[in-house]
Amino acid sequence: MAKLRSAGVVGVLVAAACLSGCGKEVRLTFINLTNESRDVHVTSPGADRQYLGVIPPLGKIRHTLRIEKKYLPATCRWTAGAHAESFRVTRQSDRRLWIGIRSPASAPPGGQGAVEYD
């Protein structure tokens, strides 16, 4: 019985350590606002380029991005076909980011996409 109780305490301590010192986790939601399907990739420090999948027109795809503490603050980059943009993740970043993939004609000044924080 004492071993079971000790295992529970160790589990709680490991979970608390990860929450306080393991970096940042951000849930990305990509929304394709163009009239063409797009292959989506994300690149972040300490990780290889990740293929997230194909988003159909007006479709969306979600991805959880984990960044180790040693890489924060981190500049990350997404690509969706010919569209590309960078975004920054810090310890204070919102846990959810919404990224709109827009055609160049409808893009806001300074970028092809838009990052919105939830």
Image: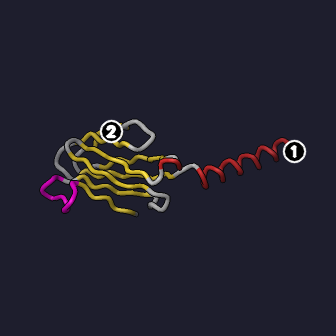
Task: Work out whether residue 78 or residue 88 is closer to the camera in this orientation and state it.
Answer: 88
Q: Is residue 34 above or below residue 50?
A: below
Q: Quadrant of the N terminus?
A: top right
The quadrant of the image that shows the C terminus is: bottom left
| Colour scheme shown | secondary structure
Q: Is residue 108 magenta?
A: yes
Q: In this figure, which residue is indicated by the disc labeled 2?
A: 53
For this rendering, which residue is in front, 70 or 15? 70
Q: Point out which mark residue 35 bears.
A: none
| Residue 73, percent from left and from top | 45, 54
Q: Secondary structure at mark 1?
A: helix
Residue 81, by quadrant, is: top left
Count of numbered marks: 2
- Rate crowding at label 2 as few (under 14), some (14 to 19) or many (20 or more) other CA atoms within 10 Å: some
What SS does tag 2 mark?
strand
Horizontal and vertical percent position of residue 77:
33, 47
Q: Are marks 2 and 1 in contact (CB under 8 Å)?
A: no
Query: What type is the residue that disc 1 sits on?
Result: Ala
Left or right of 90 on screen, residue 61: left
Tell me the residue at 31%/46% (across/down).
Answer: 78
The answer to whether residue 5 is magenta is no
Image x and y of residue 113, in percent: 25, 55
Rendered residue at 34%/54% (across/down): 87
Say whether residue 62 is left or right of residue 33. right
Magenta-drawn segment: 103-112
Q: Amino acid at mark 2?
A: Gly
Q: Which residue is mark 1?
A: 2
x, y (%) of residue 32? 25, 50
The residue at 65%/50% (across/down) is: 15
Magenta-drawn stretch, dominant element (helix, strand or loop): loop
Q: CA distance from mark 2 to mark 1?
A: 47 Å
| Frontmost residue, 20 versus 38 | 20
